Image (spheres, rainbow, N blue to C red):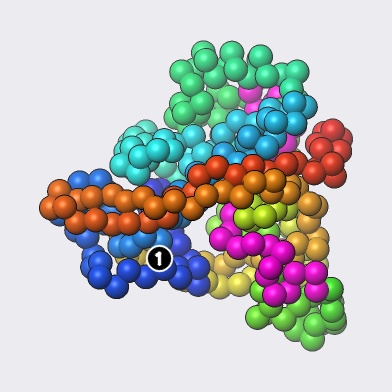
């Protein structure tokens, strides 16, 4: 799958908005996106991902103790134009780096900010990071105290039906603690297809990876090593979901939903984002509307700050 389509893939279970009046938009009729966006879910996914990574970066930088930068291909891509976003991935593919897997963020101690900024300036800016091979970035990577894989969900965590529900012995888990498969609660998601690449990156670079999952009202964190232990010990089972790409192709993927009970509280929302109307228009004047995420602030918890201080 092309990296542009991969990053915008939407789980069918999460594709809740359907615009029945919009049919498939072919390349011949559409200026902005040759990948044939079929509906607003993909544009919302793009906007949501951009918003959540920026929210985490700003939250870390506002601590004045740590400094975060975008590192993965999606995090360093253009953020204000879906066409520019796609052309960025076209360039990445042409460079032969379209299928690299790097964590989305790198977090440094604040005293290393000047070094990081100078390093980025010398290579032409943070957006150039994905086009540079890993062994040429070691001076930067080795300054990081933690690498972050970002996930996000369109949910208010505290209003999810099984929020604050205690884990109970489950027959399917051999008596181990868990919740029923149908339980709706905050989880920290890791895709099966990302496990091996992330594990390899962590082993090679000796920088710990954490997964940070953002909801509307809060965020949770889980170390990659702990997530792997939960799977190995049979506490978390894979969930098979069907994903649809903008071009229409569907694939079945295993994901791991780690209960937030196993995670640490990462951040609390101090200001909710605004959901504002936006749209793109094809050359024939056909409007494709979607909801855009703007604003909102997240405050890093004391628990998370204390954890980062340990690195």
At which x and y percent is residue 56?
64, 41
At which x and y percent is residue 182?
65, 80
Magenta stretch: includes residue 112: no
Whether residue 104 appears in this view of the structure is no
According to the picture, the residue beneath numbered tag 1 turns out to be 244
The quarter of the picture where the C terminus appears is top right
In the image: residue 162, left or right of residue 53: right
The quarter of the picture where the N terminus appears is bottom left
Report the residue at 80% width, 52% height from top.
264
Front residue (pair 16, 310): 16
Whether residue 282 appears in this view of the structure is yes
Q: Is residue 167 above or below residue 291?
A: below
Report the residue at 64% width, 42% height from top.
297
In the picture as drawn, the residue positioned furthest to the bottom comes out as: 171
Front residue (pair 100, 155): 155
At which x and y percent is residue 24?
23, 65
In the image: residue 55, left or right of residue 177: left
Disc 1 is placed on an element classified as strand
Q: Is residue 307 above or below residue 258?
A: above
Q: What stretch of residues is rendered in magenta? A: 139-165
Magenta stretch: includes residue 158: yes
- The quadrant in which residue 258 appears is bottom right
Report the residue at 28% width, 57% height from top.
288
Q: Residues within 10 Å of mark 1 (few under 14, many from 20)?
A: many
Report the residue at 13% width, 53% height from top.
284
Front residue (pair 77, 103): 77
Q: How many marks?
A: 1
In the image: residue 209, left or right of residue 133: right
Q: Is residue 188 above or below residue 309?
A: below
At which x and y percent is residue 36?
26, 56
């Amino acid at each position: 799958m092309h990296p542009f389509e991969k990053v915008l893939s939407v789980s069918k279970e999460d594709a809740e908005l359907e615009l029945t009046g919009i049919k498939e938009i072919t390349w011949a009729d559409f200026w902005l996106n040759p990948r044939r966006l079929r509906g607003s879910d993909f544009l919302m996914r793009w906007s949501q991902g951009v918003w959540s990574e920026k929210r985490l970066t700003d939250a870390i930088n506002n601590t004045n103790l740590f400094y975060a930068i975008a590192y993965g291909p999606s995090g360093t891509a253009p953020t204000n134009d879906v066409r520019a976003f796609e052309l960025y991935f076209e360039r990445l593919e042409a460079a032969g780096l379209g299928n690299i897997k790097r964590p989305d963020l790198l977090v440094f101690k604040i005293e290393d900010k000047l070094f990081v900024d100078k390093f980025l300036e010398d290579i032409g800016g943070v957006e150039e990071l994905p086009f540079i091979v890993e062994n040429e970035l070691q001076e930067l990577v080795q300054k990081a105290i933690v690498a972050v894989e970002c996930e996000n969900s369109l949910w208010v965590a505290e209003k999810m039906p099984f929020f604050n529900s205690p884990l109970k012995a489950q027959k399917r888990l051999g008596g181990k603690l868990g919740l029923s498969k149908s339980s709706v609660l905050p989880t920290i998601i890791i895709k099966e297809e990302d496990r091996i690449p992330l594990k390899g990156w962590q082993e090679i670079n000796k920088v710990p990876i954490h997964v940070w999952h953002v909801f509307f009202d809060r965020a949770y964190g889980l170390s990659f090593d702990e997530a792997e232990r939960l799977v190995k010990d049979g506490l978390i089972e894979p969930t098979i979901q069907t994903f649809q790409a903008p071009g229409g192709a569907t694939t079945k993927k295993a994901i791991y939903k780690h209960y937030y009970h196993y995670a640490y509280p990462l951040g609390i929302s101090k200001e909710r984002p605004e959901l504002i109307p936006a749209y793109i228009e094809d050359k024939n004047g056909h409007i494709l509307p979607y909801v855009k995420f703007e604003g909102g602030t997240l405050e890093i918890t004391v628990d998370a700050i204390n954890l980062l201080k340990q690195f």
